[in-house]
Amino acid sequence: MRTIRLFPLELGRLLRSRMTWLVILLAVLSPAAGLTLYQPAYADTMLSLYLADPALAGGAAGGILFGLLTIFELDRAGRSRVDLLTDAVISPLSMALARLSALMAAAALTAGLAALAWLPASRALIGAVFTGSDYALAYLLFFGLALPLSILAAGAAYQFTRRADLSLVLFAAFAGLSFTVWADDWQLCWLNPNVWAMSDDFSNFRLFRCVAYMRLTWLAALAGLWSISYLCIRRYGKGLLGSLARCARRAYRPAIALLLLACSGAACAAQPFYDDSNPDLTAMELYELESAEQVVFLERTIQVFPDTSAGTVAGRAVYRFQNASGQPRTICFGVNPGYSLSARANGAQVSAVRSGYEESNMALWEVAIPGDQTVELELEYGGFPKDWNISSTTQGDPEISGTYLCLENQNLAPYLLNVLPGEAGYPTTVEITLPAAMTAVPFGSSDAEVTAEAEDGARTWRYTCNSLGGILYAGDYIREDIEAGGITIQFYYGRKHRAVMEAAGAADAVKAVVDYCAGHYGPLSFGAGGALKLVQSRVAGGGYATDGASLLDEADFTAANLGDAGKGAGAGEVMIHELVHQWWGLGNMFDVPEEGSPWSAEGLTVYTTYRIVKELYGEAYAQEHYADQWRREVEDYYLNFYVRHPEYLEKLPQEERLTISNSLSQVRRYCEMPLKLLRAEALVGGEEAMDQILHDLFNREIDYTYPYLTYQDFLDACGLTEEALDLG
């Protein structure tokens, strides 16, 4: 009761302090650092640039500021040498709780003010893809929860040491660990969560769940640590241990502290987001299992029921086998480590045992089947899918929500490991039930059709395929069918991105690129049956392709990327640039470029974009907006001080050196290499000759031990040397 009466008095005193309002003001302004100085998100989505980065920067800076304020406030009585008097009037334990409550209230006020202050600017910068839920959750989890964590950490440091200088050192070291040693561990970076990207067009619920789990785990841990430090508050002239022994007489106090620490440890160990796969990435134990003797796969049927509100999956898969051995056999499956599994064979319950071994985001399950000639094995599975532990710094997959999901291989259904296929291969029928707004898109040549619709609008989609695994995308998609290059392009992109795509002339860009590249270089090898799906994915860090489908990363089509003058003079031309990567980047792969080398997929892509624009808008336009711009950039590049004196670049701090090197490499790949290609075009006899060379390179026989298109391959095809393309 004493603490409750003290709280409003202590809060009033705190809010009358100029220091408090200075800290609040600086914390409210600190998200501005995320626009320029501290940008931890890697992807250039609008929400990453203008929401995640500011909220993360504000959380880190605000947390540090409130940690300093906490130490300053707790040391006030000792610094003024009135602590003996105040302790005589008010119990230091009651006072500690009142101060903590007042600081927490000030932190909540600061978080609310920051969210309100930055709302208009964020809404204007983010544009059409802004949503209130993303904004509120980002400022709550990235910004707001950083402040109480810092208050607890700094408060615990002071209550243990009773010295402001030592408390500052301990708090600084604890915060520094989050930015250095612990920076790549999503559970340990308590002050600066690993947020590599936020999606503009789809949902971010798994990312928010992941950050919330980490924050709450640390909240329990630091609350437990603060509770122990609370027991160490000096009383009756005793030291740390004497005060601890006296305060611990009331058993509920240490019990609360230990319970909080135990809950934190249990939550950390039982985290549901990442698996325990073998850290050896070359391990192939699951793929080298001995085949079940005389057992043959016949067919399977899969029914999937995602819970888009909980982010979980439930499913039923029925496998038919022929068992010619007449003996019981053990069938092995790779299942997402977050799923549970039960099995019935020919109607009877059978043993399904999880071995405990995990590899490549698959847990090994062993299922016993009887010796019957034909076996119908029914597997029921489900749970919250875990991601591969190597992806722990790129949270967000596998996202399952009412606007997007991607279920790959073992996430879609148990992956058969040790049974060979029959003559028909792996015939599979898949059914998935989705909310009304979602469209199912099998990643391949198969097409899904709606077979049933429930009263609540949920629809069941069905498709067939012939593969051991499979990838299924679903989302709130718009589909446009475009006839180009002699095939039908099924273009799927997020509904929220419609305004951006229409402004960029997406359909026209797709047609222009496919007509030009297919006509000059040849059709894409992953087009199938006269059709090709172009599917926009949630931000994933890249694309890939298979027969009948190709993935377009959401990050390539954000408003920020479509305004990149280095890729094109306008949004539509940047769209062309990104689509050309289907030929130079996916259709022909490029190795990671060597440092200082201009050769990469970007050079051929920029050159091809120039040629398409030249055909669409004329030579004068292409010359002005592409070739002339490249020359200006390259001339400035060769005048750069660090290019002329590289020895000075090596003397700079690593962070500055990397920033400058990255900027210079961009010029080399986006400007110098296209100019070299123009020079090569002139030396080989003009555009037709260059087109023939690129056509032959695109359709060359691939060496699968090293499938990359190299600079030397290009030079050999042109009959040129590297020196012949020097621009000096």
Image (cartoon, helix red, strand yellow):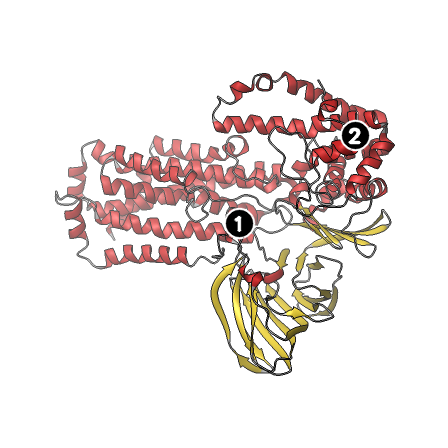
Q: Is residue 381 left or right of residue 526?
A: left
Q: Position of residue 724 (x, y in %)?
A: 75, 23
- Is disc 1 placed on a helix, strand or loop? helix
Q: Are marks 2 and 1 in contact (CB under 8 Å)?
A: no
Q: Above or below — where is 75 with respect to 378?
A: above
Q: Position of residue 173 (x, y in %)?
A: 34, 37
- Figure quadrant of residue 617: top right
Please indicate, yes or no, whether residue 617 appears anywhere in the rendered image. Answer: no
Residue lying furthest left in this view? 237
Q: Nearer the viewer, residue 680 or 700?
A: 700
Three-letter amino acid code at disc 1? Ser
Question: Residue 169 bears which disc, if any?
Answer: none
Q: Residue at x 49, y 57 (%)?
A: 275
Question: Residue 719 bears which disc, if any?
Answer: 2
- Is disc 2 placed on a helix, strand or loop? loop
Q: Residue at x 63, y 55 (%)?
A: 404
Q: Above or below — where is 351 with respect to 620?
A: below
Quick one: quadrant of the C terminus? top right
Please indicate, yes or no, whether residue 28 appears anywhere in the rendered image. Answer: yes
Q: Position of residue 344 (x, y in %)?
A: 57, 78
Which residue position is annotated with label 1?
391
Query: Which mark's residue is nearer the viewer, 2 or 1?
Result: 2
Q: Nearer the viewer, residue 487 or 82?
A: 487
Q: Position of residue 262 (x, y in %)?
A: 33, 57
Q: Residues within 10 Å of mark 1 (few under 14, many from 20)?
A: few
